[in-house]
Amino acid sequence: MRLGEEERAMLAGEMGPARQWAIKHQIAVGDFFDAADFVRVGQAHIMADTESLGASGVAWLEAIARLPSAERRVAVPTITDPRGLDFASYKRLKQTETMAGLEARTIAAFEALGVLMTNTCINYQTILPPVFGEHMAFGDTGVVIYCNSVMGARSNFEGGPSALAAGLTGRTPRYGYHLEEHRGGSKHFAIGWRPRDLADWGALGGIVGRACNSYWEVPVLSGLETPPNSDELKHFGAALASFGSVALFHIPGVTPEAPTLAAAFAGRPSPAAVPIGAEDIAQFYATYAGDGDKVDVVVFAAPQLSLLEMERVASLLKDRRVHADTSLIVATSPEIKFAADRMRLTQSIEQAGGIVTAGVCFYQSYAREMAEANGWQCLLTNSAKLVNIIGGYGYRPTLASMQRCIDSAVAGRLV
Amino acid sequence: MAIVLNCHPGIGPTVTGTALVAVDNFSARYDLDRLKGTFSRPAHRLYGESYHDKILVLVTAKGGVASAWMLREMKERGIVPKALVFDRSNTILAQGAAFAELTLVDRFEAGDPTRLILSGDELMIEPARGRVTILNRA
């Protein structure tokens, strides 16, 4: 890679061992992807829940946090993805003091680095959205695909160590979706109908993701009659990234790099469109269905809920009570939780028997240990991303609309 | 007789070991019970198989930025694949391999490695040279 003066200084250790580690790590990754040089980034966003870090990862962070201030503090605004534990609710979820201890140590280490503990995967709805063409080092697949596609930002999936490295150096290797040559559409899907529910949007993302099955594919969706809203694109993108490892999509007339179908394919001929119909969505639901089963836990998360989703959950629970043998968990960002508290949405959900968590996401919160401690197996959710992930943690997941999730939570079984 | 497969230069040290191959994908978060060292997602083609000390040969990496931290954490605990071989890696697994100093290669001249390598093959992976050698066929 071609290095500038400051990058050479970092590599030589002149700016301390943390930045030296960071630039070495970035050069190794950049070489792997044939990056020619670095590009400066506006923000970094770090996924680093303690289940992923483990005790050794936390200790590694703490070693950086002990360096002198000038050597350890991040060079650009650096924010965090959901944490693994909410101190206000962890005892109700039967998470342990050991988990809480690791969490506290991790937060202290990140704060020593100057990282802002935003604890959210919906920063594009709640913190500081990127603008068109802005290069970022974002570290949550749902965040990356939304910001690349809906906002026209430029980011790769940056795993926790790489996002931290970008925070420390203020740049990232220029490869993948930082380059125009990778941003044109490569597959075409025709949608002749409009998904009705957020879970439908997630199912659509799952179907397109399975068909793409590569980080390097860029799907284009045509045929949508009216533009989706932010929450719909959030669920679609999160599922697409989860099922297919996809980081960018275009919807002609909706997303900014695709004013037309021709523009979506960057001047290349449009491939033949693969039709996706309502029957495909029904078939997708059928692969994550367990009618008649008792429901142990209903989860609204992955991604964290917007204020409008919080209001919808509260409305659907109005004058109702979650069944005594079923848990209902809602995960949102700290910023939305403050708003939901002020507007008494949190109170409504919790009075009905739900648990509102802030700054966490279900699958990043020791899901296996929670299942064992609470006796959870049958999980119901409106998140296609979550049903894709959570089977590996020993759950039997079912995908359903928010309405059906709430009705089932009240009944204590799938309805 | 050894079979040589050329690929893009990769990450990590030269290693030798036994291949475990599947036409499926990989995520440390989605697919593994990292305490037991087994594939734990029922839909995965390697469900129930131990990955410890194996050279995993799979199509690509899926979802989940967590894998970038998890590879190092798995290595620290000593229950970790010996190397990762993909048709095409996503960014997360490459970053995770760089962080963990774990061997990873992809982009083979002869195409998808899950069609070139068999489970049980003895392999030598030389990331710096961009070369995988099948030392003994299963």
Image (cartoon, grey):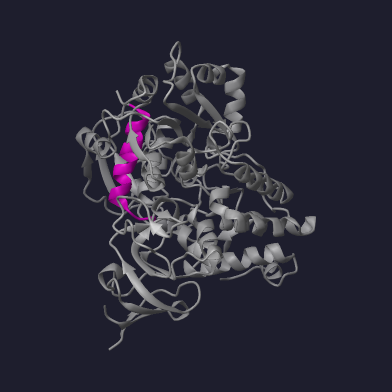
The residue lying at 63 percent from left, 35 percent from top is A87
Against A198, residue A117 (above or below) is: below
Residue A139 magenta: no
Residue shown at 39% from the left, 59% from the top: B38
* Residue A158 point in image, percent of width and height: 52, 54
A199 in magenta: yes
Q: Please name the predominant secondary structure of the magenta segment in the image.
A: helix
Which residue is more in the foreground, A154 or A63?
A63
In the visual, does A79 lie left or right of B127?
Answer: right
- Residue farthest toward the bottom in the current orientation of the protein: B1
Q: Position of residue A316 (x, y in %)?
A: 42, 17
Left or right, residue A373 beside residue B47: right
In the image, residue A398 above or below residue B87: above
Quadrant location, the C terminus of chain A: top left
**Quadrant of res A216:** bottom left
Residue A104 seen in render? yes
Q: Position of residue A208 (x, y in %)?
A: 30, 45
The N terminus of chain A, quarter of image? bottom right
Residue nearest the viewer, comparing B56 with A172:
B56
Magenta-highlighted residues: A197-215
Q: Residue at x 60, y 21 (%)?
A: A341
Please tell me how many numbered marks the rendered image carries: 0
**On the rendered structure, is A317 left or right of A71?**
left
Q: Quadrant of residue A204?
A: top left
Relative image position of residue A260 (x, y in whole percent): 34, 41
